[in-house]
Amino acid sequence: QVQLVESGGGLVQAGGSLRLSCVSFGSTFSSNAMGWYRQAPGKQRELVAHISSGGRINYANYADSVKGRFTISRDNAKNTVYLQMNSLKPEDTAVYYCNAASGGYTYWGQGTQVTVSS
């Protein structure tokens, strides 16, 4: 069983920055691939960024809409994955969810609201 707890959301003006954090409990964090998803009102949940598990090199990939603005990273010593969001736009407004893939299962956090004002 994996429990994910997100934090760091809030209200920011367009062009601003936020950093989201997600702490993982209950598994070997370094073995889990981790991701950030978001869901805006009336829209489907979509992948924002994903980072691979383990190894000396972590591979990350991003949605086209956030490339060059968002950075996903992980600190295995702290069981935490981060999403640094820069140059935020109003269209980035959504609930952001942390995701973990572990032992063939997928786990979700409770979500954190990010609101970008124009």
Image: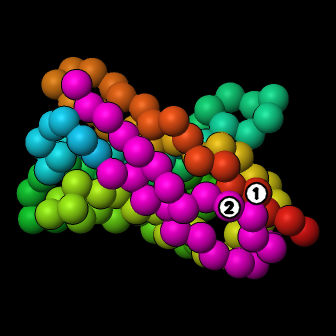
Asked if disc 2 and disc 1 are in contact, CB closer than 8 Å, the reply is yes
- The residue indicated by pointer 2 is 10
Q: Which of the colour schemes (rainbow, by chain, secondary structure, one colour) is used?
A: rainbow
41 shown above or below 115: above
* Residue 101 against residue 97 in the figure, above or below: above
Q: Main secondary structure of the magenta part?
A: strand
The answer to whether 41 is drawn above or below residue 93 in the figure is above
Residue 17 magenta-highlighted: yes
Specify the quadrant of the image occupied by residue 101.
top left
Is residue 8 magenta-colored?
A: yes
Mark 1 sits on what residue? 115
Foreground label between 2 and 1: 2
Labels 2 and 1: the sequence-earlier one: 2
For the N terminus, the quadrant is top left
Residue type (three-letter) at the residue carrying disc 1: Thr
Q: Nearer the viewer, residue 72 or 5?
A: 5
Quarter of the image for residue 5 reads: top left
Q: CA distance from mark 2 to mark 1?
A: 6 Å
Q: Which mark is residue 23?
A: none
Mark 2: amino acid: Gly
Residue 47 lies, in percent from the top left, at: 53, 41
Q: State which region is magenta.
A: 1-23
Residue at (80%, 73%) from the top-left corner? 14
Instruction: Tell me residue 117's x, y (percent).
Output: 86, 65
